[in-house]
Amino acid sequence: MLDAYYLATERAPKNRLVATRIELLFAKQLFVAILIFLANLPEEIMKSAKLIITLLTFIFVSMPVLAHNPKGESFSLSGKITSITLSDQGGVINVSAEAGRYGKVFLTYNVTINPAVPNQGSFHGNGVGFNDEGVREGGSRQGVFRRDGTTMQFYSLDDVSDGELNYCETLIDLKKETVEMTFYPL
């Protein structure tokens, strides 16, 4: 921070530790000066400043939530639930589907319910696919889910053995035993 000053005035301390202490002292003095300036602002300006800071904080915190809008290349598949096994912590959902270049695929969702919020939780699982030539590709998946009535919405990141990384949105209808998935390569 003060290196340019030292170069211009040729007053650089001989010891870098001394320079670091001077820089810290300068930073502390600057911080105190800013606090004194803010404390002496008229009340109307302080109210406006607080409102602006609150709005900017809300905007920056909200941006990641509003930013979710996958675009670009994607592929979708429809499948069916082949079995569900329940446990005290959640359960396992098994799915089969036809998945384009991956052929016939089998997926497992190991679901863990959030004890504080029973309509949501996390999951991990695996998938395997066999195309028409018999080539096998596998992958791991992990993510979160939310349940609304008889439908579950899953959001996952998948690591596939062919080198692909995918973001996936899955809608499972427990009543109809159907699965709709959309993959977005990363």
Image: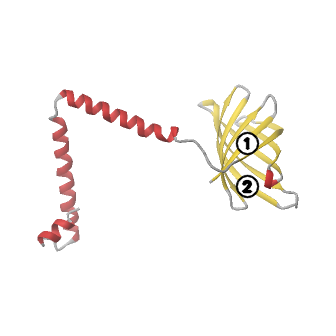
The mark tally for this picture is 2
Seen in the image, is 5 located left or right of residue 150? left
- Helix, strand or loop status at disc 1: strand
Q: Residues within 10 Å of mark 1 (few under 14, many from 20)?
A: some
Q: Is residue 107 above or below residue 120?
A: below
Is 15 in front, or is 182?
182
Q: Position of residue 87 (x, y in %)?
A: 75, 36
Disc 2, SS: strand
Q: Amino acid at mark 1?
A: Met
Give the x, y percent position of residue 183: 69, 47
Q: Which residue is depicted at the point 35% across and 33% down? A: 54
- C-alpha gap between disc 1 and disc 2: 15 Å
Who's the residue at 16% across and 40% down the image? 37
Left or right, 65 with respect to 7, comes to right
Residue ID at (36%, 37%): 56
Comes first in the chain, label 1 or label 2: 2
Nearer-the-camera pick, 150 or 49: 49
Relative to 155, is 68 on the left or the right?
left
